Amino acid sequence: MTTAEGASATPRVGAAEAGRRPRGPRRWHRLPIVLRLVLAVAVTMSLILGGAAGLVYWRVQHALDEQLDADLATYYHELRVDLLAGHRLGGPDGSAYQVLDTRGRIIRASDLVRTRQLLTASDITSVTHGATVRRDIGGLLPLDPHTLRLKAQQVRLPDHRTVIAVAALRRGHRDEALRELLAQLAIAAGLTLLAASYVGYRTARAALDPVERYRRRAASLAGGTSGLRLPVPEDRDDELTRLGHTLNQMLQRLEAAAERERRFVADASHELRTPLSLLRAELDVALHRPRTAAELTRTLRSVDTEVQRLIDLSNALLDLEETGSTQQVVRAPADLADLLDGAVSPHRRTAERDGRSLTVDAAPAIVRVDVRWLRPAIGNLIDNALRHGHGDVHLAAEVREGVLRVTVIDDGPGFPPAFLPRAFDRFARADTSRTTSGSGLGLAFVRAVATAHGGTAHAENTGHGAAVILDLPC
């Protein structure tokens, strides 16, 4: 194999191994959340129950072993005393004994172990070297009726002989108690595990049921149904409830955005139709037959007027849409006098040309507003007053209890009473013929700016003209 082949083969093997490694975690994450929670609870409870059962079993076994060892020590002591005194050997029920020579041959034994060798060759060797042997014969499982615990030591008799004394006690009661304990622990742990798993499942199911309801309702929303909200209980305040409220707020914002987009498209198509039709008519007339230079000039001026109208209308629509889609204004400290001067300055020449007075009355103050939007909003009010009103125009501003009030007053005839309730609607005009200048979006823009600031805008008729008032928290 060449070096190039080896270099190309190694990454393939590594990629295959890397692809195999995460299969376990991938499968785990593919399981339903409820099943994962139940499995986690079951594994955790199994570890806890296993640890608790092991501790209980160890403590009981230790207590039983201590008692059995104490009884065995007592029995061995009595056996040794009787053996040294030459008395008849015996013992309590469940006991057994053997007396062996140093070669391991049985000299004397109780009926239970008369033909059974209790010590192994290694045990005999250890005892003859002075050690004490303690061990068990038989196990806890499987069941064995002849399980014993023995103790063996070397004993020197009065006649100078050396023998090995073996004392043994049955372990039946101890083993039976431990087996019963194991069975009870297994049953208790199994029932506890089942109960914990069931409770975990019901708890997880109850906790995730709102999520499933949200999913089903979201599926209906995705199908195009509007105006629906997720079913969020009002008497709770947990994580899922807060999630539901957040999703409902998101749905409300999405619907508002969709509604703004729909209105923007509808308004634009409705308002752009008239100037575009006029443009098309002017061009058709101009192309119908040869025109003189003067006629073409008039046509181009008319087209220029309509194009400028389209530009103004498009800018107004875009400004209104941007204001309506702004989640919050960017407030910054601003000098009130500078703010008003910046809004009024572009209109002074128009007022002077028409022979009208444009006055400003404002006390020195610092306000926290979004100048980027408030300045053109005030400019729109002044433009409306100069365009549709008569006489002098007066701009007044004052700050009281944290609220900035801006008022624009003219000396014209005022608003028609039937028009006042819809004066701030989009494309609302007192003159329904649509032949007057303006797009009908100025006051709608003013109200959008006021709403974005958390304030209000309203219009009213005074005894000598119209007044538009803005109240903005500052």
Image (cartoon, helix red, strand yellow):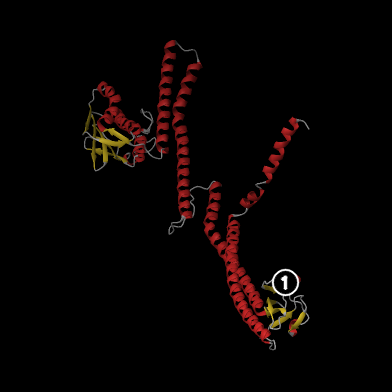
Is 149 left or right of 44, judged from the image as shown?
right
262 vs 74, nearest the viewer = 74
333 vs 451, nearest the viewer = 333
Locate residue 82, reporting x and y percent.
Answer: 66, 86
Image point (76%, 71%), residue name: 121
Question: In the rendered view, would you say 185 is above or below 453?
Answer: below
Where is mark 1, residue-wise? 123
Q: Which residue ends up furthest to the front in the rendered image? A: 160
Locate residue 124, reporting x and y percent.
Answer: 73, 73
Q: Is residue 290 visible?
A: yes
In the picture, the quarter occupied by the N terminus is top right
Badge 1 marks a residue whose secondary structure is helix
330 vs 322, nearest the viewer = 330
Image point (42%, 38%), residue name: 325
Image point (44%, 58%), residue name: 236
Q: Is residue 424 visible?
A: no
Q: Amino acid at mark 1?
A: Asp
327 vs 73, nearest the viewer = 73
In the picture, the quarter occupied by the C terminus is top left
Question: In the rendered view, would you say 146 is above or below 424?
Answer: below
- The part of the image, by quadrant, that contains residue 94 is bottom right
Q: Which residue ends up furthest to the top in the rendered image? A: 293
Tag 1: Cα neighbours inside 10 Å, few (<14), some, or many (≥20)? some
Q: Which residue ends up furthest to the bottom in the rendered image? A: 88
- The part of the image, by quadrant, that contains residue 275 is top left
Is 219 left or right of 266, judged from the image as shown?
right
Question: In the rendered view, would you say 315 is above or below 139?
Answer: above
- The part of the image, by quadrant, that contains residue 151 is bottom right
